[in-house]
Amino acid sequence: MTVTWRDFRRARRRSRQAWALLGATMLALLAGLGWFFTAGQFAIAEPRVAGPTEAPVLAAGWMKPVAPVRAVPSGLAVDLLSVLPVKGRAASGNYNRSAFGQAWLDVDRNGCDTRNDILRRDLAGAMFTEGSRCRVGSGTFQEPYTGRTIAFQRGAASSKAVQIDHVVALGDAWQKGAQQLSPLQRQHLANDPLNLIAVDGQANQDKSASDAATWLPPNKAFRCHYVARQISVKAAYGLWVTPAEKDAMKRVLGACPGQQTIVPR
């Protein structure tokens, strides 16, 4: 059978196209396998939880804002992230919780300590203990980190089921700029409602002093607010982020490019 030059060139072109398509398919397959064996298998394994998408900051009428180092600018969280300093961690061997003052002070001077302020702010139907106008004894809420509905009951064994989390953990803050703050500024950081959320006790223990690069709330619906809140706290107190932390925050915000900073109001 005679093959013309035109037919030969057409067949060769089709062969090249087929090989190019096969190569692209193989590259996509390899990329998919690489993703699965790094982050993918963990993302697939994460529980799908429907929960809150945000948490309150101030409660009108009885909560007062705490003076930060500088005001949180309004705007896109990703834009504020882009101007945060990026550095490595400072030494943590000299960290002590007492550097941030006594736990749960009445920094805003509303007559109640910070822990009870946050419980009252976050719990639905919060009830005070008998004879107190501050001490929260019970309440329920849909917890933001896990999405579970939790009942709080004050008691030696039961209170730990609901804990107050520092959104930017104090241990993390200490390694990223808080050592340069004054004692009063660190005290404000530890008691600022912007940096505090009532959460599931076990989730709080799991997080410990992690940043966004090593821990995110299991409730994915809350992650955009969570990261934006961390960025807002770090901007308010002149703290920095590590390269890995910044990358993790950018990935989260990539799913919600319109996420705003969290400005206490």
Image (cartoon, grey):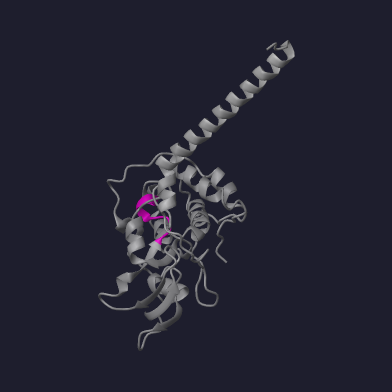
Residue farthest along the bottom direction in this orientation: 131
**Which one is in front, 105 or 85?**
85
Quadrant in which residue 96 is drawn: bottom left
> In what quadrant of the picture does the N terminus appear?
top right
Q: Is residue 119 above or below residue 77?
A: below
Q: Is residue 107 left or right of residue 1?
A: left
Residue 79 is covered by the magenta coloring: no
**Which one is in front, 118 or 132?**
118
Q: Count numbered badges in the picture.
A: 0
Q: Position of residue 253 (x, y in %)?
A: 55, 50
Residue 171 is covered by the magenta coloring: yes
Q: Is residue 75 above or below residue 39?
A: below
Q: Is residue 30 left or right of residue 10?
A: left
Q: Is residue 65 above or below residue 99?
A: below
- The answer to whether residue 171 is visible is yes
> In what quadrant of the picture does the C terminus appear?
bottom right
- The answer to whether residue 242 is visible is no
**Which one is in front, 90 or 148?**
148
Query: Which residue is located at x 56 percent, y 56 percent?
Result: 72
Residue farthest along the left direction in this orientation: 156
Q: Is residue 263 left or right of residue 37?
A: right
Segment colored magenta: 166-173
Q: Position of residue 210 (x, y in %)?
A: 37, 51
Q: Is residue 247 left or right of residue 2?
A: left
Q: Is residue 131 above or below residue 165?
A: below
Query: Which residue is located at x 38 percent, y 71 percent?
Result: 115
**Which one is in front, 27 or 198?**
27
Q: Position of residue 198 (x, y in %)?
A: 41, 68
Query: Which residue is located at x 70 percent, y 12 percent?
Result: 3
Q: Position of residue 42 (x, y in %)?
A: 40, 49
Quadrant in which residue 22 is drawn: top right
